[in-house]
Image (cartoon, rainbow, N blue to C red):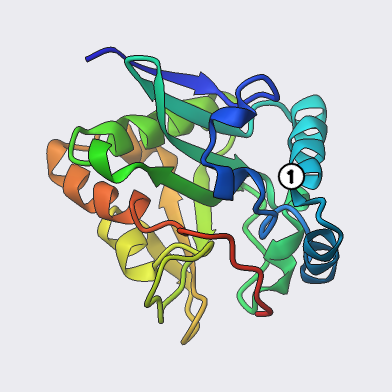
Amino acid sequence: MGRRLVPLTLDNLQDLPQRCRTCVFWELDPVSGKAAVSAGTPALEKESWISAVLLDWGSCGRVVYVDDVPVGFVLYAPPAYVPRSTAFPTSPVSPDAVQLMTAFIMPGYQGQGLGRVMVQTVAKDLLRRGFKAIEAFGDARWKEPACVLPADHLLAVGFKTVRPHPTYPRLRLELRTTLSWKEDVEMALDRLLGAVQKEPVLRPL
């Protein structure tokens, strides 16, 4: 099994699942997101966002390939590039951290350690760029796939709550801890990364 983790660019954006290529939950603020959906332009907005972040900040994602088949991805960026983050009651993300926006591994490829490799690759990238942690907003009342990852699953893979909230706690993962992960977190990562949205959901927070 040949597997590759490739930086996300405009050239391989089409390798993301269709529902994710047209989801701008994180990339736009709630009002702009609804406007983009109403205008039928979310795919263009997504491409524009990735282009701007790549030019201004650099790599903001990874795409996972197994035998040249795209099977998963992760998106991350400093909170200044993530308008939706300000809509959460537990914002802002810490200045020394990058926000984990969303991630996904196709069900047929879970259980192969891809989640661990993906997160460790992101950790190495961000450590080289001077960041200390990844933070994410979790959904403590998660019941079905959506754009916000389930808080329980984030906790299961080593995130710690830094600002509690009954619905949307903010959680933090120290990057150096990810580099020494053992195989015992792979199952938890598979659950986490398999719990991302089936369809884009733009809903008010």
Residue 130 visible (yes or no)? no
**Residue placed under numbered mark 1 in the picture:** 43
Where residue 168 appears, as percent x and y from the top left, is 52, 76
The answer to which of 152 and 158 lies nearer the viewer is: 152
Question: What residue is drawn where x is 33% and y is 41%?
Answer: 177
In the picture provided, is 55 more to the left or to the right than 169? right
Quick one: quadrant of the N terminus? top left
Type of amino acid at the residue the image marks with label 1: Ala
Q: Residue at point 28% right, 12% down?
A: 2
| Residue 91 picture location, percent across and down | 66, 69
Quadrant holding the C terminus? bottom right
Q: Residues within 10 Å of mark 1 (few under 14, many from 20)?
A: some
Provide the secondary structure element on which disc 1 rests: helix
- The residue lying at 76 percent from left, 48 percent from top is 81
Direction left: furthest residue = 184
Q: Residue at x 69, y 79 (%)?
A: 204
